Image (cartoon, helix red, strand yellow):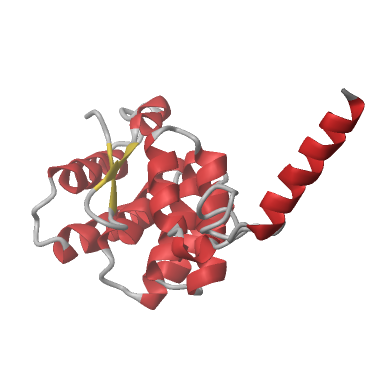
Amino acid sequence: MRKSRAFLGLVLIGLAACSTGGFHRSSDGVFAPGVSGQSDIDGLIIGHRLMAGAEYDLALKAYNRAAAQQGLNIDTMSAIGSANLKLGRLNQAERWLRRATQEDPTFVPALNNLGVVLMEKGQAGEASAFFERAFAADNGNSDEIRNNLRFALANLANPADTVIEDVQTFSLIRRGAGDFILMTDL
C-alpha cells in the first residue's frame, strides 16, 4: 500500500512536470488563466465593476494597479479621485480630481466629481463653477449635472435653506467606459 502511494505520487509529479504548465504559473498551464499574466486585465474595468458593487476600497486598489500599468492619465486620475470621494477621503479626492481637470479641462466626470467634493467641503461657490464647466462640456445633456448645478447655486443663494445632509445623497453613475457622473436625488 505504501509503495503504491509513493508510485502514484511520483507519477503525478512526473505528469505535472511534463505538462505545458509544469510547476510554474502560466496562462496555459495547470493554474487558473490570468493568474500570472495580469497585464491583460484592465484595472479600470475591474475598478468600475467594484465601484458599482460598492466595494470602494477594492476599486481604489484596482485603479492604482491601472495607473501603474497604464500610467497616470485622465481616466486613472479621475477614477482614483472618484474612489477616494466614495471613501470619504475628500482631500485626496480633491487632489486627484484637480490633477485630472488640469490634464483635460473638459473631462466631464472629473469636473462634476470635483464639484461634488467641493460641495462636501462646504465650498459651494467653487463647486458651482465646476458644475457649470461640466454642464457646458457635456452640452447640457446630463440632467444629473444640471441637478448638481442647481443644488450648488441654491446653496450659494441661501446656504441656510440647504441642509448639509442633502449633499450625502450624491451617487456615482457610470456612463460608458471610464465616464462617471455623480447625481443627487434632488
Work out whether residue 78 or residue 186 is closer to the camera in this orientation and state it: 78
* Residue 154, image x, y percentages: 24, 39
Specify the quadrant of the image occupied by residue 101. Answer: bottom left
Taking 178 as reference, is 123 above or below it? above
Q: Nearer the viewer, residue 61 or 180?
A: 61
Q: Residue at x 86, y 36 (%)?
A: 6
Q: Is residue 98 left or right of residue 1?
A: left
Out of 178 and 92, give the one closest to the viewer.
178
Looking at the image, residue 175 lies above or below residue 97: above
Decide which of 138, 68 is in the foreground and name it: 68
- Residue at the spot 66% in from the left edge and 59% down from the top edge: 18
Image: 52 above or below 102: above
**In the figure, is residue 184 to the left or right of 46?**
left
Q: Position of residue 58 (x, y in %)?
A: 55, 42
Residue ID at (50%, 52%):
33
Name the spot of residue 142 as percent of width and height, x first: 13, 49
Q: Residue at x 39, y 42 (%)?
A: 49
Question: Would you identify the image quadrant in which residue 139 lies?
Answer: bottom left
In this rendering, position of residue 93 left or right of residue 107: right
